[in-house]
Image: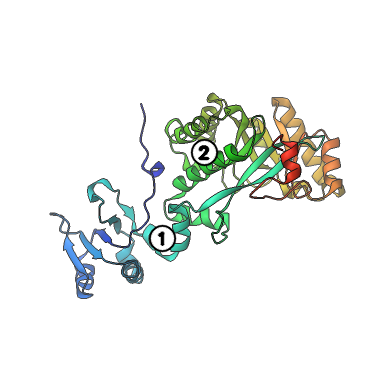
Amino acid sequence: MNHICSSCQSVRPIEDWGTVYLRPVGRMLGRLVEERGWVVGREGCESESLYISYASREQFLEMAEWLNSLPVEWTEPLQVKVCGEKDSPALLPWLPFAQLAVRFQNMHMVDIITQERFTSFMQPIVDGREQIVAYEFLLRAAPGEEPFNPFELFDVARRTGMHSFLDRAARISAIRRSAEVLPKGIKRFINFLPSSIYNPDYCLNHTFAAIQRYELDPQDFVFEVVETERIGDMPHLQRIFNVYRSRGVSVALDDVGSGYATTEVLSQLKPDFVKIDRGLIDRCDESSEKQRRIAEIVALSQEFGGAVLAEGIERREEYEFCRNLGISLAQGYLFGRPAAELSASEDRLTGQA
């Protein structure tokens, strides 16, 4: 039985004309709204709610900015719906006003999210012979679009309640791009946010459907917990890992050795791939403390059969140390920067030439 999650549904952009519904609206706020001359009315028999019609994006922004300037004790309890001309208000969920405020303050970022104006860049991952065996797919601006900072985009998505939509759309974008450029047998590392997946059995169906739609092999996919994600609910993350694995894909833990991705977390989750944090890799050939910590991660990973990947390698000396320690995979500027297309040499290595 599927449990539909509203956070997984498509996010509609704010249209250039429509209606904003507000509740609960106290007597003072209602009077101030009506005094501004907007087209307003009461919603059904709900005496504490009203709606405001707008006829342009500029008018919507003016309305949102004015509401946001009001005393916080008036706006904090407010819930809103923003309905386009053809939307049915009864079918749309009520959202906290704070989300609307963030949306209008970051309309450019919101447009990138709702219109999916992004693509995936690829960074190579090599084995011990320096042969490309995988790529990590990283969210970037679509061709011809203004560049954005992925961290800032996800931060806006989180504060506007759109992080589940963005996380899912980014995964599907990476799957689609991998189908366009990579042959079978080359692994594709794709990030995910555990907090965006409320019900793994339902929320991940879109991901598995995309893999099937593009006729790809699930065994070529590795889904990894992103570096900014706080690991707060271990049983939930374990359930996500179990669902991924049940569908034939692998899982990875990113930034191990830093922040929340500790060796204790590593021993509990036992991921298929262990990505060592770039902070530990940086000049690891010169630091006995870093070498000790890296060796500890490698030994622990070997106990449960996890393949270790060293991230952020920029110097030959770092790579040689990691390879001599038995680390089988590496990623970093030494081997290639994230790029929109494969280079000619990468085409040959992946059999595309």
Mark sitting on residue 233? 2
Mark sitting on residue 82? none
Residue matched to label 1: 103
Q: Amino acid at mark 1?
A: Arg
From the top left corner, tell me how far across and down residue 350 is, in percent.
Answer: 71, 36
Q: Quadrant of the C terminus?
A: top right
- Image quadrant of residue 105? bottom left
Q: Is residue 217 left or right of residue 131?
A: left
- The reply to whether residue 265 is visible in this rendering is no
Q: 32 or 300, which lies in front? A: 32
From the top left corner, tell me how far across and down residue 153 is, in percent.
Answer: 52, 56
| Residue beneath the point at 47% across and 32% down | 209
Q: Secondary structure at mark 1?
A: helix
| Residue beneath the point at 55% across and 38% down | 175
From the top left corner, tell me how far across and down residue 330 is, in percent.
Answer: 75, 40
> CA separation, marks 1 and 2?
28 Å
Q: 227 or 14, which lies in front? A: 14
Q: Is residue 214 left or right of residue 183?
A: left
| Residue beneath the point at 57% across and 25% down | 248
Q: Sort mark 1 into few (<14), some (14-19) or many (20+) by Cα contacts within 10 Å.
A: many
Mark sitting earlier along the chain (1/2): 1
